[in-house]
Amino acid sequence: MKDLNHVSVIGRLTRDAELKDGKCNFSIAFNTTKKDGDKWVDEVNYLNLMLFGNLATALQPRLTKGTQVAITGHLKQSRWEKDGQKMSALNVVVDEIQMVGRKKSESTESVPFPSSNNNASDVGTPFDDFGF
């Protein structure tokens, strides 16, 4: 049986995508929440992504800092040696990508997004007992 290796995430590019030898590298930031004592607090996470082939070449000019994208892909571990030490990084290879929003700077109107920490003290979650 083949193991499951699937990633889906929506986030904003942290920098302009770089294209080299048919490979496009970029990173996105996305928010999650975590419980800190009795409150829920926002936490920013960063993810490195790789896009290959004709799609990388075609999309690279549009993959600019602040652009919101939805991606699906799979995890790939890169390994190398530097100064005699073994190094590794976990990246996402993009299988599908879609532009889902404007850059924050292009937005003409602000629409509030419901936050999971609104009234967090009034609403419990199944994970409350575990400290998540």
Image: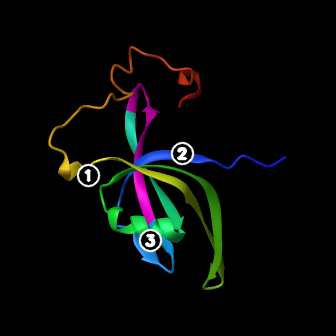
Residue, disc 1: 103
- Where is mark 3, residue-wise? 57
Is 106 located above or below residue 129 in the figure?
Answer: below
Is the stretch drawn in magenta largely helix, strand or loop? strand
Q: Nearer the viewer, residue 77 or 99?
A: 99
Q: Position of residue 18 (x, y in %)?
A: 41, 73
Distance from Cα at disc 2 to Cα at disc 1: 20 Å
Instruction: Please identify the residue farthest to the top as the structure is shown.
Output: 122
* Element type at mark 2: strand
Numbered circles on residues, count? 3
Q: Gap in Å between the C-alphas at discs 1 and 3?
A: 21 Å
> Which range is magenta?
26-40
Sequence-wise first label, 2 or 1: 2
Q: Are marks 2 and 1 in contact (CB under 8 Å)?
A: no
The numbered dot on residue 8 is 2
Q: Is residue 72 magenta?
A: no
Judge depth for marks 1 and 3 and give the one in front.
Answer: 3
Q: Give the Cα separation between the discs numbered 3 and 2.
A: 22 Å
